[in-house]
């Protein structure tokens, strides 16, 4: 990943609604969520959410596909992996022992620290 790609990725997440949308989609991976359901759960108007999802899509964080009359959005764990690899690529001067705590947090799945917004 190039520095400009990383910067675009971080910029896309530097807004609360977009970060919440990505976290919600990550919780619903791999099936994803319909755009209307995302808007309802985040309590965001459809057109506003659409603009946020477009930004996340251009940055590589989400993808979408049509199912019947719905557009289903999914998070991109592969993109997240590339961003994290970019961040830790030079970590700890190559000493795996120093990076072990960080790597341990990446190798276990845990419950999200915050719950989904209630409808």
Image: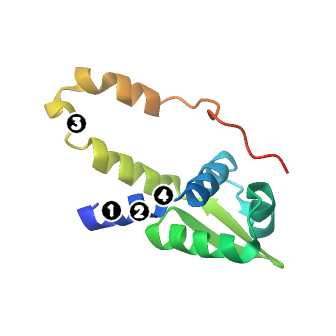
Label 2, label 4: how far apart the Cα atoms are: 5 Å
Q: Are marks 2 and 1 in contact (CB under 8 Å)?
A: yes
- Residue 73, image x, y percentages: 67, 65
Q: Are marks 2 and 4 in contact (CB under 8 Å)?
A: yes
**Helix, strand or loop at mark 3:** helix
Q: Quadrant of residue 3?
A: bottom left
Nearest to viewer (mark 3 / mark 1): 1
- Which residue in the protein does label 1 denote? 7
Q: Are marks 1 and 4 in contact (CB under 8 Å)?
A: no
Q: Residue at x 52, y 28 (%)?
A: 108
Q: Residues within 10 Å of mark 3 (few under 14, many from 20)?
A: some
Q: Are marks 3 and 1 in contact (CB under 8 Å)?
A: no
- Which residue in the protein does label 2 denote? 11
Label 3, label 1: how far apart the Cα atoms are: 18 Å
- Which residue in the protein does label 4 denote? 13
Mark toward the start of the polypeptide (3 vs 1) = 1
- Which residue in the protein does label 3 denote? 91
**Helix, strand or loop at mark 2:** helix
**Helix, strand or loop at mark 1:** helix
Mark toward the start of the polypeptide (4 vs 3) = 4
- Residue 111, image x, y percentages: 64, 31
Nearest to viewer (mark 4 / mark 3): 4
In this orientation, does residue 2 appear? no
Q: Is residue 48 above or below residue 12?
A: below
Q: Is residue 94 above or below residue 44?
A: above
């Amino acid at each position: 990943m190039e520095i400009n790609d990383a910067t675009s990725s971080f910029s896309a997440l530097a807004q609360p609604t977009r970060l919440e949308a990505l976290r919600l989609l990550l919780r619903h991976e791999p099936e994803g969520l319909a755009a209307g359901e995302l808007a309802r759960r985040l309590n965001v108007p459809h057109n506003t959410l659409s603009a946020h999802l477009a930004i996340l899509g251009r940055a590589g964080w989400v993808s979408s596909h049509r199912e019947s009359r719905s557009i289903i959005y999914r998070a991109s764990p592969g993109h997240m992996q590339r961003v994290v690899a970019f961040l830790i690529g030079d970590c700890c001067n190559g000493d795996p022992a120093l990076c072990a705590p960080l790597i341990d947090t990446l190798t276990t799945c845990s419950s999200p620290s915050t719950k989904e917004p209630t409808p």
